[in-house]
């Protein structure tokens, strides 16, 4: 039986850090995947701002499960130098935040290009980032975001085989659904390498994000499988995406479709947390 530990992207409850911490306390969640802080990306924090964030987290009794960074969420046909400089700064931020893990991606192929044509460039960039992270004592964990190189199971497996234990993996059911992937088949291919999960669900028909258990991501079945296989701690990070929140457009270019309606971001955040807790209560 796994020991599930809850975390959350609390910037979906509020852009303001103080309100994020209040939301986490109300949901009885003691971990945060830090992404948006007072209206800016975590990657844009200065070291002094990171120190102030850490002090607030400590006072609230909240720890970071990961830095929810945008690293690797960039086009492959654009220069790497500026992105790499931002990544180096992210490693410094982790030291100030006492964070040992960074969520990251495997870059966007140019529009209309065959991802296979860019495989070596992806590998070269990730190799550079992983080497720097390893020296800094930070684990990079790849998320299966749609339209990046590692958006489908086959290419996630390629990354696993290429980088081995150097790279961790986040399993996001909704992202696979939006790529028209059967999440149960994806789990069979990837389960041995899952570091932790992002918990959100979606509909195959139009990619709309819905509360966990309401979509085609087989979230309850995936968690049951994980629970049966694992005996260690497994972090489950709630990523609601149930309403349009501040900073969403900076995360993705396309417009999210919503079928479930919530009066505000805090209510949507509570709905997402409650949906996961309801699933876990059945295990």
Image (tube, rainbow, N blue to C red):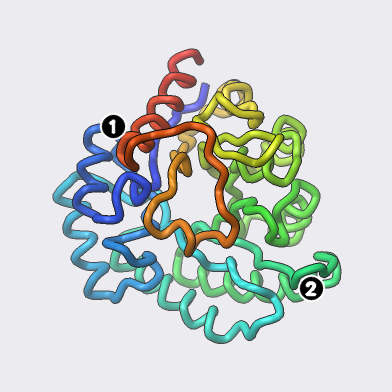
The CA distance from mark 2 to mark 1 is 43 Å
What residue does disc 2 label? 120
Q: Which one is closest to the eye, mark 2 or mark 1?
A: 1
Q: Is residue 127 above or below residue 59?
A: below
Instruction: Report helix, strand or loop for mark 2.
Output: helix
- Report if residue 258 is visible in the image: yes
Residue 116 appears left or right of 188: right
**Which of these two is toward me, 248 or 33?**
248
Q: To which residue does mark 1 refer? A: 27
Using the image as rendered, state which of residue 228 and residue 269 is in the foreground. 269
Residue 204 point in image, percent of width and height: 70, 35
Marking on residue 79: none
Q: Is residue 103 above or below residue 228?
A: below
Q: Position of residue 119 (x, y in %)?
A: 79, 69
Q: Nearer the viewer, residue 212 or 258?
A: 258
> Looking at the image, which residue is at 68% across and 61% down?
148
Single out the residue that lies furthest toward the top. Answer: 282
Residue reaching furthest to the left: 59
Q: Residue at x 36, y 59 (%)?
A: 36
């Amino acid at each position: 039986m796994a020991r599930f530990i809850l975390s959350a992207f609390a910037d979906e409850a509020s852009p303001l850090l103080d309100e994020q911490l209040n939301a986490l306390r109300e949901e009885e969640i003691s971990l945060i995947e830090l992404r948006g802080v007072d209206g800016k990306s975590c990657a844009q924090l200065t070291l002094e701002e990171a120190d102030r964030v850490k002090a607030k987290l400590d006072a609230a009794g909240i720890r970071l499960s990961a830095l929810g960074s945008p690293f690797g969420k960039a086009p492959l046909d654009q220069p790497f130098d500026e992105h790499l400089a931002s990544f180096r700064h992210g490693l410094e931020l982790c030291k100030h935040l006492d964070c040992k893990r960074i969520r990251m991606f495997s870059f966007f192929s140019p529009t209309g290009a065959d991802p296979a044509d860019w495989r070596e460039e992806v590998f070269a960039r990730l190799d550079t980032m992983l080497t720097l992270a390893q020296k800094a004592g930070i684990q990079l964990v790849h998320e299966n975001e749609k339209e990046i190189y590692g958006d489908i199971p086959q290419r996630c497996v390629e990354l696993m085989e290429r980088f081995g234990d150097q790279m961790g993996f986040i399993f996001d059911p909704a992202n696979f659904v939006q790529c028209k992937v059967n999440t149960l088949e994806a789990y069979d291919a990837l389960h041995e390498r899952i570091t932790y999960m992002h918990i959100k669900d979606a509909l195959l028909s139009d990619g709309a994000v819905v509360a966990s258990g309401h979509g085609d991501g087989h979230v309850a079945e995936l968690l049951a499988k994980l629970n049966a296989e694992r005996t260690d701690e497994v972090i489950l990070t709630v990523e609601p995406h149930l309403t349009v929140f501040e900073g969403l457009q900076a995360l993705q270019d396309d417009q999210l479709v919503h079928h479930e309606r919530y009066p505000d971001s805090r209510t949507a955040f509570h709905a997402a947390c409650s949906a996961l807790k309801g699933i876990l209560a059945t295990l």
